Image: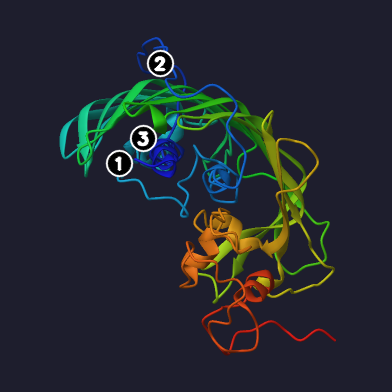
Amino acid sequence: MTHGRILSAASALTFILVGCGGGSGGGDSTPVVETTYNGLTSDAPINRESAAALVEFLPSEESSLPFFSPSPRQSQPTVSLRPVPKAFAALSSPGAHQKSVVRVEEALDCDSGFGEVRGSIDDVTYLGSYVMRFDECVDDNDRITGEIEVSWTKADPYYGDPIDITMKYNDLSGVNLDTSEEMIISGMVSASGMGTCDMLSVSDLIMQSSMPENSILMEEYRLRIECDYSLSTSYETEKYTYSGSIYIGDLGKIMVSSEDAIFALNVYDFDSPLGEMTLLADGSISIQNSTGSLVFEGLYQDDTSPAPREFLVKVMLDKGLDGELEVDMIIPAWWMASPDMMDMEDSDGDGMWRGWELAHGLDPTVADGALDSDNDGFTNLQEFVAHTHPMNQSDFPAEEE
């Protein structure tokens, strides 16, 4: 199981909750079991070799809420339980408001085993709490046991959508039936202002894997998303402010932060394999600890409708925090959404990243930066710097004026 799959599995389970109802009182609950993080706790190495893995933990429109929606750039979860409490249908019936509370008591659709939702819903405010309980509940390739407690403290009274919500993971265990890897999730995630122009989420979670290298610990991991109108562009933009520590099982601890990070939403690029994307346009985001820093700075130009490939980001890697940048270059912003492209290793010393060479049909073990593989008059290294294709004669760097 990859780091991405771990995050996606947790995402899926919580995404289920956002699609469900809430209620007041309701549902017996059990105490949270303190799961122990079993990965590395020392500071993670921040260098060329680790960059691709670290970038997976940078927020984007899809993944920055890792416990509210699955990330399409990571492996998709197999958990697909999506209960829709019958109580919500009752709330829309003509006689709904003759009641003060509607009980939720409903089975989940498991291939085998058992799962249920129990709680209650205030028929006017939509506030309250409920518990999702799993007992060897098998869905596709995952077997789930444990509980998630959900509490709605604020909701849209017209549509019944959550605004402020808290989720508590009570020793929730998931076993992948293909790999036999088990992940136990314990802790809490809360969000306020969901669906508004000022949303804040806080995650304090332990994800303990039977394979310690895949375990994750999040301490006071905060993300704030605000509507933004500061850029002169036709794209919708949002401001992300985030901070906190993440422990990655096989790497160690990193701290993530941002400064006026503005993201452009729903940018579609035919040249990108990722299709529609969320791109860093302005401001900066950083990963840092005592071993180094990795900073991404958006280089937005005042252009109302920039082409997708015109969204550029400056990457600065300071290994050892000695002020000497091991990496200092400009890349297309969409590379950040592709961990493979962010593999900055350069074992052959030809100046080109391993990830880029692999993606463009070059051999990362051969120093071929000075070669012109497509005979277009530009070396492979020149094409790397210009973000053009070294194996395509019709895609070459623009002539400087």
Q: Regarding mark 2 in the picture, which secondary structure is present there?
A: loop
Looking at marks 3 and 2 on the same chain, the residue that comes earlier in the sequence is marked by 2
Residues at marks 3 and 2, CA–CA distance in whole angstroms: 33 Å
Task: Name the front one of labels 3 and 2.
Answer: 2
Task: Indicate the position of residue 206 as horizontal and vertical percent values.
Answer: 46, 23
Q: What residue is drawn where x is 51% and y is 81%? A: 391
Q: Count neighbours of disc 3 (C-alpha within 10 A) and say few if under 14, some if 14 to 19, many if 20 or more.
A: many
Looking at marks 1 and 3 on the same chain, the residue that comes earlier in the sequence is marked by 1
Residues at marks 1 and 3, CA–CA distance in whole angstroms: 17 Å
Q: Which residue is mark 1?
A: 81
Residues at marks 2 and 1, CA–CA distance in whole angstroms: 24 Å
Figure colour scheme? rainbow
- At label 1, the amino acid type is Leu
Q: Which residue is mark 3?
A: 87
Quadrant containing the C terminus in the rendered view: bottom right
Q: Nearer the viewer, residue 265 or 306?
A: 306
Task: Name the front one of labels 1 and 3.
Answer: 1
Dividing the picture into quadrants, the one containing residue 130 is top left
Q: Which residue is mark 2?
A: 35
Looking at marks 2 and 1 on the same chain, the residue that comes earlier in the sequence is marked by 2
Q: Count neighbours of disc 1 (C-alpha within 10 A) and say few if under 14, some if 14 to 19, many if 20 or more.
A: some
- At label 3, the amino acid type is Ala
Task: Indicate the position of residue 188 as horizontal and vertical percent values.
Answer: 51, 23
Whether tag 1 and tag 3 are in contact, CB under 8 A, the answer is no
Could you tell whether 144 is left or right of 45 in the image?
left
Does the image show residue 153? Answer: no
Q: Residue furthest left?
A: 112
